[in-house]
Amino acid sequence: MRTLVLAPFSDEGLVALERMGGMTYEPWTRTQHLHDPQQLGARVASEGFGALVVEADFLFDELFEAATTLRFAAICRSALNQVDLDAATAHGVAVVHTPGRNAQAVAELALAMMLSLARWLPQASDYLRRGEWWDPTEPYTRFQGRELLGATVGIIGLGEIGRRVARLARALRMRVLAYDPYVRPGGRGTAGVTLTTLEGLLRESDFVSVHVPETPETTGLLSARRLEFCKPTAYLVNVTAQAVVDAEALAAALREHRLAGAAMDVHEAHPIPPDSPFIGMPNVLLTPHIGGATVETVHRHSRMVVSDLEWFVAGNRPRHLANAGVWRRLRR
């Protein structure tokens, strides 16, 4: 089965795809191009591709309508909001995704942000680069931070990423609180974690780390009223979903020193608008949505996709099949 790969992929994965029938490799990170769904579907059909691997491209009904040779599509992401699963099923296309592919990378970034906030690392680096380090004693007071040992971290959302953050925090001997209404005491990932209410978590945490997806239920979860529960010495870390936090209320809390600082890898828009209140705030760390940007993430999703395609070609149900209904259709 020939495969068109539009996602970053490992060399080992590309070799495996070549052995399974050939492949064409055009990752969007290299081409800097996202395809029109209908045009992409027409290309898939004209060049006889049976499998398509994407990370950023959208797979809508018009793609499946045009891609008459397509039988397998892989999304190198956990989320499935860029694919019309009903359309894929109607056209007999099995869709797989790669849940957890970047969980470790995002968890480590969250921890790195906590350390950076606690020890003023970006500010200290800028201070040195600007040539301001004349007094050898000044940095000891100007950048006096705090240790994570013994501090309390509150994790909002105890999914795969949240559980990994909890493990990393426990390794540093931090006290770990968590809020997740879908997790019960004794459930997966709760060892060494104290489940509590959202308000209780905000009141007690030195670091609040957000790890819930953007849904109608979570949008605005950290509202102006709830941010008031936070300690003025607390830090907020958000590497998951921008809409979970009321941005205007957060900016006000930071300006008024009702919150010590914040770090964010997710933003309202890309690029960040030049009038964003967070740009220029000395107690804010901003990164350009790099949570999953690791070599290991690419290797992980490459292995998952290759494995599922091998299973599919052999007539077996893929492990990470997203549209279960298509399997009944294909097995008739």
Image (cartoon, helix red, strand yellow):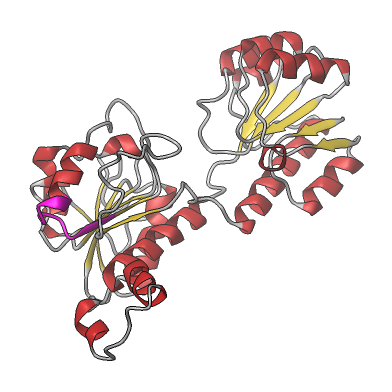
The vertical placement of 263 against 8, above or below, is below
In this orientation, which residue lies closer to the viewer: 138 or 164?
138
Looking at the image, which residue is at 40% across and 34% down? 269
Q: Is residue 237 left or right of residue 260?
A: right
The x, y position of residue 297, in whole percent, is: 60, 52
Along the line of sight, the residue nearer the viewer: 138 or 150? 138
Q: How many marks?
A: 0
Asked if residue 272 is positioned above or below residue 146 in the image, the reply reads: above
Asked if the stretch drawn in magenta spans residue 258, the answer is yes
* Res 155 seen here: yes
Magenta stretch holds residue 50 = no
User: What residue sits 64% from the left and 32% below the top?
Assistant: 96
Q: Quadrant of residue 109?
A: bottom left
Residue 246 visible somewhere in the drawing = no
Image height of 49 relative to 257, above or below = above
The residue lying at 80 percent from left, 53 percent from top is 12
Q: Position of residue 142 (x, y in %)?
A: 21, 78
- First to last magenta residue range: 254-262
Q: Position of residue 134 (x, y in %)?
A: 31, 87
The reply, left or right, for residue 5 in relation to residue 127 is: right
